[in-house]
Image: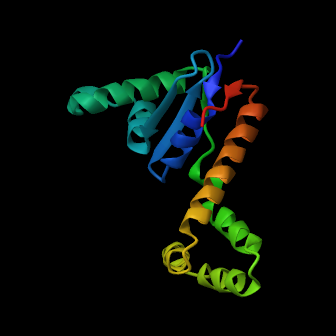
Amino acid sequence: MAPVVKLRDVVDEMDTLNDELRAYLNKQTGELITVSSEELQAAEAGDDIESYPDWQKEAIQKAQEILDSDAYLPLPSKFDIHEYSIMERFCYEIEDAELSNELLFQIQGSGAFRRFKHAIDRYNIANDWYRYRQQALEQIAIDWLAANVIPYERMF
């Protein structure tokens, strides 16, 4: 039976992901591990890790363990989370139609995330956004855990 993982830990791990980081859950131990793309590539290529700094050697060894084992499941990636979509849903859920339309306008085109951040600060709804975003990440994590039959506990 899979160990019970803390939903908060999974959400926190997902929240730190970017283009360069990948996170995994060990189904047997419940351990969450984050490795960089560079470390995964070094492990895949079978690079001589002696040329890497000590701190990175350990990470490359962990990446190799992830690649060699069926025990690790990749957490939802930045692309699975699709923050733009979460931002857009938030805009549509704003009850004030004028504000909703303004926010939707701000998230169009290049620079959408920066303009959105400025707008939520200007309209004093940043806390609402961060709460909404947190709930969206929690739901993504819950759906992922359920799909992979991983028991979890809420500890928020």
What's the residue at 56%, 80% (across, down)?
A: 123
Tell me if 107 is positioned left or right of 21 in this view.
right
Q: Is residue 80 visible?
A: no
What's the residue at 38%, 35% (across, down)?
A: 42
Residue 100: image location, x then y, percent: 71, 80
Looking at the image, which residue sits at the far front? 124
What's the residue at 69%, 73% (across, down)?
A: 91
Residue 72: image location, x then y, percent: 59, 25
**Front-most of residues 71 and 30:** 30
Q: How many marks?
A: 0
Q: Residue 87 is drawn in which quadrant?
A: bottom right
**Front-most of residues 43 and 111:** 111
What's the residue at 72%, 46% (across, down)?
A: 139
Tell me if 88 is positioned left or right of 18 in this view.
right
Residue 25: image location, x then y, percent: 58, 28
Q: Is residue 56 visible?
A: yes
Question: In the picture shown, does residue 4 fall above or below 109?
Answer: above
Quarter holding the C terminus?
top right
Q: Residue 85 is drawn in which quadrant?
A: bottom right
